[in-house]
Amino acid sequence: MVQTAVRHTRVLAIDDSPEFLSSLRAFFETTPDFCLVGAARSGDEALALAQELRPDLVLMDLQMTGMNGLEATSEIRQRFPEIAVVIITAHEIPGLQQVCHESGACDFVKKSRLYQDLPEVLARFLSSRRT
């Protein structure tokens, strides 16, 4: 019998809230096909971990002290174009989704709907990687 290794999608989570990062850890413990490989609390940390861990996907908070999520997303996409970024935010600003896409994000999720919408976003990500 030949066994094939299951490759999980490697996820890096970035948010300045330790509580939110803990909730994401719990979410990914029960989410098949995905593995949370790291977490950071700032845009600068995100860049360093993206280089070190080379995740497939980054979940990026929009508003953080120092380098914000849009700046970090743009920098990650420039340095590592193979890494996809999904912006996660609590903010309800008209046109924000467009700005996120312009920074290089492949998708956008509101924190108020995170657990309803994130599974669909992850499914779209997997589908895009298989085609």
Image (cartoon, rainbow, N blue to C red):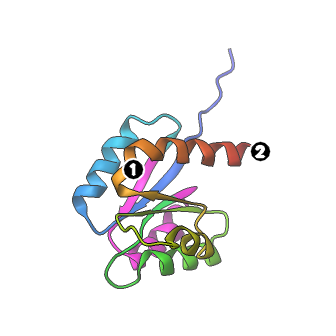
Name the element at disc 1: helix
In three-dimensional space, the C-alpha distance between marks 1 and 2, rounded to whole angstroms, equals 25 Å
Marks 1 and 2, the one that precedes in the sequence: 1
Q: Position of residue 18 (x, y in %)?
A: 24, 61
Q: Name the one closer to the observer, 96 or 11.
A: 96
Number of the front mark, 1 or 2: 1
**Number of numbered tags placed on the structure image:** 2
Q: Please, is residue 2 above or below residue 21 in the view?
A: above
Q: Position of residue 112 (x, y in %)?
A: 34, 54
Q: Residue furthest bottom?
A: 66
Write down the residue under mark 1: 114
Q: Please, is residue 85 above or below residue 93 in the view?
A: above
Q: Residue at x 54, y 57 (%)?
A: 57
**What amino acid is at disc 2?**
Thr
Q: Please, is residue 10 above or below residue 88 in the view?
A: above
Label 1: how many residues lie within 10 Å, few (<14), some (14-19) or many (20+)? some
Indicate left or right for 99 with 130 as reference.
left
Q: Quadrant of the C terminus?
A: top right
Q: Name the one closer to the observer, 92 or 24.
A: 92
Indicate left or right for 47 with 23 as reference.
right
Q: Quadrant of the N terminus?
A: top right
Q: Any magenta on residue 36?
A: yes
Name the element at disc 2: loop
Q: Any magenta on residue 96?
A: no
**What amino acid is at disc 1?**
Leu
Which stretch is magenta?
35-57
Numbered tag placed on residue 131 in the rendering: 2
Q: Residue at x 42, y 49 (%)?
A: 36
Q: Residue furthest top?
A: 1
Q: Name the one closer to the observer, 72 or 45.
A: 72
Q: Residue at x 69, y 48 (%)?
A: 129
> To which quarter of the image does residue 84 belong?
bottom right
